[in-house]
Amino acid sequence: MGITNGILAASFDAARDAGAEKICEIRISIGELTEIQEFALQFAFEALTPGTMAEGATLAVAHIPATSHCNECGLDYTHDRFEMLCPECGAFNVTPLTGREMRIDSIETPDEDGTCPEPTAKPADWLLPTDNPEV
């Protein structure tokens, strides 16, 4: 509940600062290494939004894979939460690149006529691209 409450508080502040009275959609990104479970966020979001400016809004969650850079051989690679060793040389000397993020990417508010636009994308459609084709 605490994480979702923080997301909502920051979103309310941003929406009010922009002159909005309602929120249609909140997009967030969470890294695979954060241990945050999407179902828990969605449950808390549904429990905390009734009676607020985000009532009826959707919470779209993008998952950022865990990636690391091997400081021995230079390989950038994806991995899971438990196996960070370099798959190329087996080194343990690695630098995490992504997977620890937790951020609000955007907040959607109603159009000028007061209606919420259709959700622009499903979370799987807007996973963050990476510059490295190996990742």
Image: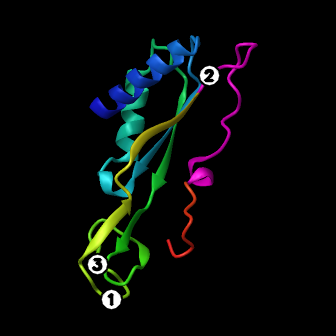
Position of 27 compared to 31: left or right? right
The residues bearing labels 3 and 2 have C-alpha atoms spaced at a distance of 43 Å
Label 2: state its secondary structure.
loop
x, y percentage for residue 117?
Answer: 71, 28
Magenta highlight: main SS: loop
Q: Position of residue 104 (x, y in %)?
A: 46, 36
Q: On screen, 20 above or below 89?
A: above
Question: Could you say which quadrant of the image residue 78 lies in?
Answer: bottom left
Name the residue at 30% across, 65% down.
Answer: 81
Image side of residue 26 versus residue 72, left or right: right
- Residue named by callout 1: 89
| Disc 2: CA contacts within 10 A as few (<14), some (14-19) or many (>=20) | many
Label 1 residue SS? loop
| Residues shaded magenta | 108-127
Query: What is the C-alpha distance between the residues marked 2 and 1?
Result: 49 Å
Q: Which residue is mark 3?
A: 85
Q: What kind of residue is marked 1?
A: Cys
Q: Are marks 2 and 1 in contact (CB under 8 Å)?
A: no
The vertical placement of 64 against 24, above or below, is below
Q: Quadrant of the N terminus?
A: top left
Asked whether residue 1 appears in the rendered view, the answer is no
Residue projecting furthest to the right: 113
Q: Nearer the viewer, residue 94 or 87?
A: 94
Query: Count the marks: how many?
Result: 3
Hey, what amino acid is under mark 3?
Leu
Q: Amino acid at mark 2?
A: Thr
Q: Which residue is mark 2?
A: 109
Query: Disc 1 to disc 3, how far (Cα)?
Result: 8 Å
